Amino acid sequence: MFTLPQKESRAPTTCPGPATTQDLGSSCDNGPERECSRKPDQKLYGVGDPTATFSSGSSYLSSRGSIIKWFWDSAEEGYRTYHLDEYDEDKNPSGIVNLGTSENKLCFDLLSWRLSQSDMLRVEPSLLQYPDWRGHLFLREEVARFLSFYCKSPVPLKPENVVVLNGCASLFSALATVLCEVGEAFLIPTPYYGAITQHVYLYGNVRLVYVYLDSEVTGTDTRPFQLTVEKLEMALQGAHSEGVKVKGLILINPQNPLGDIYLPGELQEYLGFAERHKLHVIVDEVYMLSVFEESAAYSSVLGLERLPDPQRTHVMWATSKDFGMSGLRFGTLYTENQDVAIAVASLCRYHGLSGLVQYQMAQLLQDRDWINQVYLPENHARLKAAHTYVSEELRALRIPFLSRGAGFFIWADLRQYLSEGTFEEEMLLWRRFLDNKVLLSSGKAFGCKEPGWFRFVFSDKAHRLCLGMQRVRQVLEGKSQVAEDPPSSQTQEPSS
Amino acid sequence: MFTLPQKESRAPTTCPGPATTQDLGSSCDNGPERECSRKPDQKLYGVGDPTATFSSGSSYLSSRGSIIKWFWDSAEEGYRTYHLDEYDEDKNPSGIVNLGTSENKLCFDLLSWRLSQSDMLRVEPSLLQYPDWRGHLFLREEVARFLSFYCKSPVPLKPENVVVLNGCASLFSALATVLCEVGEAFLIPTPYYGAITQHVYLYGNVRLVYVYLDSEVTGTDTRPFQLTVEKLEMALQGAHSEGVKVKGLILINPQNPLGDIYLPGELQEYLGFAERHKLHVIVDEVYMLSVFEESAAYSSVLGLERLPDPQRTHVMWATSKDFGMSGLRFGTLYTENQDVAIAVASLCRYHGLSGLVQYQMAQLLQDRDWINQVYLPENHARLKAAHTYVSEELRALRIPFLSRGAGFFIWADLRQYLSEGTFEEEMLLWRRFLDNKVLLSSGKAFGCKEPGWFRFVFSDKAHRLCLGMQRVRQVLEGKSQVAEDPPSSQTQEPSS
């Protein structure tokens, strides 16, 4: 289910503070790209150029080393502001509230309890010795069982198709490197989780070709930002016409930042498109268990009866989002293609995770009683309550937004608050939020072609959400101020 | 102290089994290289070509992906033989004994005890959230204190110069990428830990230029395989003359596979050479606490009073060897160069280790009482006893070998057992050992220019060492057989 109220006329706003290129969390700047048409609204695709705004290097580093450092510095600039002044209920109540980083902070109590149980601390010689770089067999077996169950696979998935490693960032890096030559590209529908830009580029030197989606519902579309095969075809042809070789398609399902869920029929169409063009498909399903709306029926690509091209279909999942532990660094690949599995495994020398953590993850994933009866119901209830609260706040502000009951975020349309429809104006609004001590991620960081969209992360405790949304309201109502004094009465639970 | 008895005349041997290109553990094949002179014995340097023997690719992979997979397949071929038939005292007493992989298997009892203590299982929200990719500050502070103490640093080392990640393999990969352009190279004295070839090549596309060292003591040398500045200069000039741009020098200290320890004066000379040529120096000190001979005085490069070029001196250490936990995946960089530290940190998105493991490592490193009073004395005593046993076995066989009281291995001269001084003959001998169920690493895998050297890993339990050495003896005395029956009386402790 999604909600998109009628757009209101755009109110002119003042624009305090200089424009910056700051970004944060997943909201890294993807840089400019070559566009395929004259008017911004008619852009159909774009070829990403991650280093277009890179300027000076270091005499100690290679040119690629300087670019790699520059990616850090660009992100760091945004982080620095936040980390120097992080909100803390007791110690720094006037600090910055982070509604920008997509982490689930609602279930630390449940996770801390589970990860502290005595079965989690097992130290065996084999866990301390060099592992099979694909991952210990006991863990790959557990991952296969886990994915078979939660992805509703028509046949049991196999441990030999599983490769485990330290997170999906690493998996993007490895897949880009083993599937593409330097300079080749993946198609990706926008808006998309912007960090993928660097994941495929920093080591792999692989680019993204953006398939621009529109908020406006036209033609046969049934919802905003709808991906269609026609749009994929046009982007692919456009890239080819510019001499850019496309090797694959990246799909994020549930989608980040839209919260969209692809229908099984849609998935089949996208996979069919890829098969016709012999493109690999990387399906990022890291939010697959974070579908909190009962009415939202999720279908994993591993649950489809038939894959058009199983040898070119590669699925990734991790505990970072669905188990709220982005700091634990556990991710997994599932692919029937043994060439791909082995090539990724070969790079896992550089993406390995501790044997002790592998043991812990196997213990966690096999505890189906706790997951099904405690963790998932409670996590979904908390996500839904938090989502409801932020949704209602946005409705009260008459802000249109998208949300289909999955993920940690709401994709909100703040175009009415830009004096002009430009990314400079979007950045000014982002800066005004930050000046008023609330951190959001703006649409440019997601490759959105329309300036003025923002991602609101709601998977946080009530007192932080309330304060964050209060500060958002202050900015949008032109009443923003630097919150020097701790606000009172910010701790009520959001209504569910 | 090293031991090199007079060489005996080479006895002709029979060569059962076909030549293969199998390798194992750290004994990956480094492939052919371009040589600089006519006679093998006079080779001064070589430019590594890691993919010279690569043939066919996969239609699903990029060309680099196919090469990456090929590295796995080559190693896997050797591993397969071993893993299909691993020795187990009870379940498979006629299985293969592994004296090839450099792991310390002597102290699992101590480590299991320490890692199972209740202070090791702490689950805090911050450990489950996205970390600072340089590593959590509490761990970097602990690493700085730890290295200050054990490296005898003249001034306290600083947390801001520390970057932690999931092992030194990753660190080689990251440093190669940020310091070198594609196709550039590092100098490395041979024999050397052969896996570095792939660590700098797979992601970074960086090559090695071998500085060939000789077993024969000539000129001003005081020991076999001695590295001198003259040899470094010649290799550097040779590489330049072939159009290969050299960006740095890799030093392993204590050396693998020689077990050598560089004297402070030698270190200063090598660092001075690097400074004159503006070369980075990567100093791999992963065996620094595995110096088990009291008379062997070890000097870390971080303990030198003055570094000739601190901005180009980068030190790596890990728990893999010194704490016998290669499966735990913890390594660290120490560099004063903030450009390098930040560039490596930027790549640590792909080399991150779990927050829970970071906490455990901080607990371990700060437990100075246990390390100094329990772990290190016991570990050194056990290493020494095991070393003494294998040394005596080799002496009894009249096999010349090198060993200076550091590391897990003895570098042994089996040239007398080759019918010709070729690497084909070396491989045949390696195969005869494997056929007689004992796995060793042969010199070619270490880039040694003289065929016939083997690395014997001794850091294993007595019963495995005894059986392994018995099987070695059988091969060398021409009495080898496939051991179908469990041998008896193989469990006595080695004499110390």
Image (tube, coloured by chain):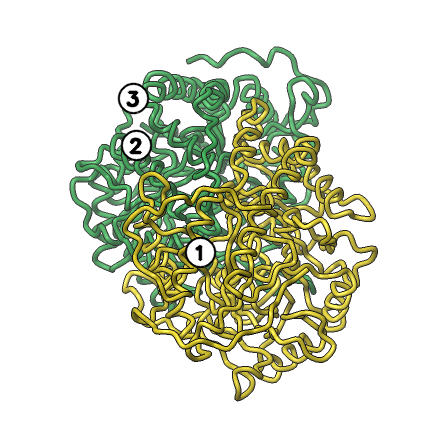
Chain colours: A green, B yellow
Q: Which mark is residue A146?
A: 2
Above-or-below relation of A434 to A266? above
**Going from the N terminus, do you reach mark 3 or mark 2 first?**
2
Residue annotated with mark 1: B25
Expressed as whole percent of the image width and height from the top left, the position of residue A239 reads 36, 63
Give the amino acid at mark 1. Answer: Gly
Please, is residue B466 above or below residue A298 in the view?
below
Chain to which mark 3 belongs: A
Q: Chain of mark 1?
A: B
Q: Chain of mark 2?
A: A
Q: CA distance from mark 1 to mark 3?
A: 50 Å
Q: Image point 53% across, 74% down: which residue?
A: B8
Same subunit, labels 1 and 2: the answer reads no
Q: CA distance from mark 3 to mark 2?
A: 21 Å
- What's the mark number on residue A84? none
Given residues B100 and A352, the one toward you in this image is B100
Q: Nearer the viewer, residue A126 or B72?
A: A126
- Circle 3 is placed at which residue position? A294
